[in-house]
Amino acid sequence: MNIKRYGAAIAVVSIALAMLAMPVAAAVVAPPGGSVNGQFNAVTTPTITATASGNSVYCTPNGVTTFTLTATVTDVNGAAASDQVSAQLYNGATALGAPIVVTSGTGTGNTATFTVGIPFPYNYPAGSAYSVVLTASNTQKTSAAYTFSPITYVAALGISIDSGSSLNFGTLGPGDTSATQTTTVHNTVNQAENMGISTNPWTSSASGAASVPASSLSPNNPSPLSIDAHAPIGFVETVPTGISPYAGTYTTTITLTASAA
Amino acid sequence: MKKLSKRGIGGLLKPFLFLLLTAAVALAVTAPANAVGVGASPSVVNLGTIGRGGSATQDFRIYNTDNSTPLNYTVAVVGANAVSVTPSSGALNPLTNTTVTVQANVNNSAKDGNYSGLLVVNSTASGRTGQAVILPALAVTVKYLVNGTAPTPQSTTTIPLVPLVAAGVIVVVIAALYVGIRRLR
């Protein structure tokens, strides 16, 4: 009797276990791409949008400004399915620089967030035809794109003295003309610049000595300076006659004023 | 050995001394010049539309673009009487920047129209005797439009909160007393 009872119980348990095992077996043999019992992800395309704190980028003279975009990627297979976001900067139809690829995002549910920094070096021209094309791709190798535009790269002003920040014209007497002394300037911003050159009178270290007028210095003006140009400015000093008394060591300043071309 | 002893230690060192002197001269010749650089962003400060009697402010940044030399600067307003800048001078360490605030105060007699001027950013340096010192400078444009009269600020009456609450409590107490008395009757 007992044996029969136990046998029946074992049989019932076996049948129950077999029934439980059937769906698992079906899942294991399901064809790829199927969606049996939620064990396989459907092939889907992500969606992407992007935001920024503004549409203007201010040039950093002789430097780089980073424009930050926040890309939001949605994928029905979950945030972890969003592989990466790549961003390409364009000025009009021209691609600038290499694409920026961001592989680490944060997210919950179906939404992942990627922060992308787009570099704007000082030598990209100012203008409002800039845009960024962001492409999101997922683990299933499908992708979607979003264009963030317009972006305005705001013009700045800047110059630096590469060499010749102080010039020595040697020893000169009335009526003498010096050799050309050269200063090299660098346009360090995102627009062409004009150069205003103003000279000041030479003043002597000797008490009672006459000053030499500013007009005695003749510069050659390289304006306009294109973006990133390194331009030489030559100065020649011609000491006028009739300056009396002249004596001592003479000193002056020359101001180079950059303005938008 | 004999030759060496004849020349002595001084004889041995002479070529090295010559080399050292040559190196020193070369260093002196190729020493970096006192390079300086200044920048301003943006190149145009637009204060927008201002009504007569009104004012507006806008910031711009001044940069020391040199990586080794500190920058002393001044900012002068040229051709725009209504405009002022704060601060109008300062010093910047290499590769740093600062914010300068531009303000326009338009008086009540200003005429409608576009106004502009320059913010001249000058770098300053002590003169070097016997030399011409080159100073970089920038001419930033400042502009604004005067249109109409600035709206007068709305006057508001402020009622102190404590007396208001106290008055409310008194009203409630009186009402409660009134109801209580009526019920007793």
Image: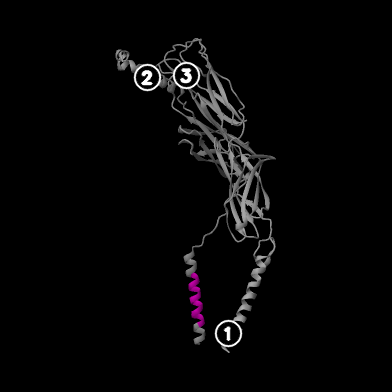
Closer to the camera in the image, B169 or A247:
A247
Q: Reading the chain from its start, which is encountered first: label 1 or label 3?
A: 1
- x, y percent for residue A94: 68, 39
Element class at badge 2: helix
The numbered dot on residue A6 is 1
Q: Are marks 2 and 1 on the same chain?
A: no
Range shown magenta: B167-179
Residue type at mark 3? Asn
- x, y percent for residue B114: 64, 38
Residue underneath mark 3 = A168
Please tell me whether residue B177 belongs to the stretch shown in magenta. Answer: yes
Q: Quadrant of residue A223?
A: top right
Residue drawn 46% across the image and 17% down it: A211
Q: CA distance from mark 2 to mark 1?
A: 107 Å
Residue drawn 49% across the image and 28% down it: B35
Q: Is residue B178 above or below residue A255?
A: below
Element class at badge 1: helix
Question: Position of A93 compared to B156: left or right?
Answer: right
Labelled pair 2, 1 in contact (Cβ < 8 Å): no
Q: Residues within 10 Å of mark 1 (few under 14, many from 20)?
A: few
Q: Residues within 10 Å of mark 2 (few under 14, many from 20)?
A: few
The numbered dot on residue B16 is 2
- x, y percent for residue A210: 45, 15
Mark 2 — on which chain does it sit? B
Residue type at mark 2? Phe
